[in-house]
Image: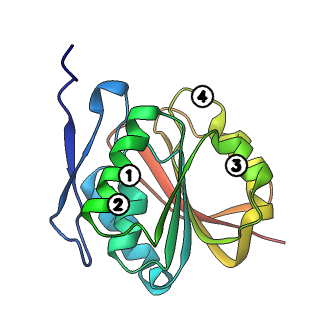
């Protein structure tokens, strides 16, 4: 049996600008659109260089790979889909980023409960139609460094109820997607 045709995404900035990586679009994975990624990385420009990042629910790996291209010190990508894991591994090899891009195969919520790592930037874009965004936010504070930033994405049709201590610094909408940059306050 033939493998399904793969979809492609383009890294839009930094060291690997214009490089193409593949992902399994047939699995329902939807990479963050180019114009949204550009806005998010414009927001993160003052802190992305050397930052320790977490791409939770990595999917295509678009946000984590973009962060690596733009100078992040390290990116941990957490993904449970076997085909997506294979394709992210391939992308890390193609970009020669295996030492800075760490792939964790497994459940994102379990990762948050078990890891001892702390992160400067977290990309949080779980599958739509699930409660995973709210569940991940509830577990997130223990893995955050001081001065952290959290990128969130949710369906434009309904903003979730965010934790009381989560402060949205910026918020925008692009088509069916709402997104923002946030931080937890003390």
Residue 163 in view here: no
Q: Nearer the viewer, mark 1 or mark 4?
A: 1
10 Å neighbourhood of mark 3: few (<14), some, or many (≥20)?
some
Quickly name the residue at label 2.
92
Quickly name the residue at label 4.
130
Q: Nearer the viewer, residue 8 or 104?
A: 104
Is 19 positioned to the left or the right of 40 in the image? Answer: left
Q: Nearer the viewer, mark 1 or mark 3?
A: 1
For label 1, the SS is helix
10 Å neighbourhood of mark 1: few (<14), some, or many (≥20)?
some
Quickly name the residue at label 1.
89
For label 3, the SS is helix
| Cα distance in 3D space between marks 1 and 4 | 26 Å
Name the residue located 48 percent from the left edge and 32 percent from the top edge. Answer: 157
Q: Nearer the viewer, residue 16 or 157?
A: 16
| Cα distance in 3D space between marks 3 and 2 | 20 Å
Quarter of the image where the N terminus is located: top left
Is 162 positioned to the left or the right of 153 in the image? Answer: right
Quickly name the residue at label 3.
111
172 in relation to 128, above or below: below
Question: Residue 92: image x %, image y %?
Answer: 35, 60
Q: Nearer the viewer, residue 169 or 91?
A: 91
């Amino acid at each position: 049996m033939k493998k399904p045709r793969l979809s492609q995404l383009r890294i839009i900035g930094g060291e690997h600008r214009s490089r193409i990586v593949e992902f399994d679009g047939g699995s329902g994975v939807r990479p963050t659109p180019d114009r949204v990624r550009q806005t998010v990385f414009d927001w993160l420009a003052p802190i992305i260089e050397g930052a320790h990042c977490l791409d939770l629910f990595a999917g295509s790996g678009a946000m984590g790979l973009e962060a690596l291209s733009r100078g992040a010190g390290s990116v941990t990508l957490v993904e449970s889909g076997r085909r997506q894991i294979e394709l992210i591994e391939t992308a890390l090899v193609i970009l020669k980023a295996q030492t800075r891009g760490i792939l964790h195969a497994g459940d994102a919520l379990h990762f948050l409960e078990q890891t001892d790592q702390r992160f400067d930037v977290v990309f949080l874009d779980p599958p739509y139609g699930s409660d995973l965004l709210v569940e991940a936010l509830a577990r997130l504070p223990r893995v955050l460094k001081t001065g952290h930033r959290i990128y969130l994405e949710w369906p434009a049709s309904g903003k979730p109820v965010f934790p009381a201590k989560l402060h949205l610094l910026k918020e925008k909408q692009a088509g069916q997607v709402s997104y923002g940059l946030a931080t937890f306050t003390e």
